[in-house]
Amino acid sequence: MSVQKVIQLLIITGMSGAGKTIAVKSFEEMGYFCIDNLPPVLVSKFAELIKHSEGKIDRIALVIDLRGREFFDSLFTALAELDEMGVPYQILFLDASDEVLVQRYKEARKKHPLALEATPIEGIKRERRLLSELKGRSHHVIDTSRLKPAELKETLIQRFGGGDHAGNNLSLHIVSFGFKYGIPIDADLVFDVRFLPNPHYVPELRPLTGCDGEVAQYVLKWTETQQFLQRLTDFLRFLLPHYKREGKGQLVVGIGCTGGKHRSVTIAEALKNAFEGEYPVRTMHRDMDKDN
């Protein structure tokens, strides 16, 4: 007796210019059946066809965006229909800062779909308002502002490529950053470690980073660091099962210090070591290589 495969349905949406084209190509390479610019009114009908495909298609990625804006208002109705049908789905929202989106439109010499007779920033702001509720309902939000195409592809493979990173399994993504450069917009939780002793003021440590053993040893040797790290680890260990039960695919934890080079990097790596073996976990040091 064959076991029926569970359908993995991913809805890809987000800001125009945030990387949906790259995402579709990445998912195709991962073996997903992809449909670009599907009208929302057809989502439930498509899901019904898939349910009767006898398992021939079980991983699907649908791109729905404002190119089909006359259909877009019906998306929430389509999601409700999926819930009634018992078809599990997740929503991936790709975002980027207004400045980056404007620059991408200039480089591509394209007009924004919501501002064909105006400047790109006007269309971007209007699109952001229209998509605000959908972003709030998304299971995954990825900010592509600082991601090169290859880095976005790698991120998607980490989250959706299979094994422990696919489906409803929760992965932990820890981002170190500098508050002087702004808080990561896709962080679910943000912790400030600027209260810890700062290696920046130790001349021989200043040019190094939190990935260097000397810096890590300096940051971790203090009692307050050990107490903070233990409490933070316990807090996250309490939260993660609850996020997983709610269907969240990834928890993005931001760890910030002043410049994002020493303390935040050290703590992020220590958290990664604490959770390896319990959850899929990876770190990204956003501002580590900047000139602080």
Image: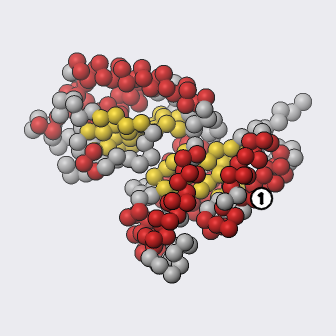
Residue pictured at 25% horizontal, 51% vertical: 290
Colour mode of the rendering: secondary structure
In the drawing, does residue 15 fall left or right of residue 245? Answer: left
In the drawing, does residue 158 fall left or right of residue 274? Answer: right
Q: Is residue 75 visible?
A: yes
Residue pictured at 68% horizontal, 68% vertical: 70
Is label 1 in a helix, a strand or a loop?
Answer: helix
Q: Residues within 10 Å of mark 1 (few under 14, many from 20)?
A: some
> Given the image, on which type of amino acid does mark 1 rest?
Leu
Determine whether 216 is above or below 30 in the image: above
Residue that badge 1 annotates? 42
Expressed as whole percent of the image width and height from the top left, the position of residue 165 reads 58, 38
| Occupied quadrant, residue 29 | bottom right
Residue pictured at 58% horizontal, 43% vertical: 139
| Occupied quadrant, residue 46 | bottom right
Q: Is residue 87 visible?
A: no
Expressed as whole percent of the image width and height from the top left, the position of residue 144 reads 45, 55
Determine whether 248 is above or below 150 in the image: above
Q: Quadrant of the N terminus?
A: top right
In the drawing, does residue 200 fall left or right of residue 265? Answer: left
Determine whether 172 is above or below 292 in the image: above
In front of the other: 14 or 150: 14
Residue pictured at 51% horizontal, 59% vertical: 129
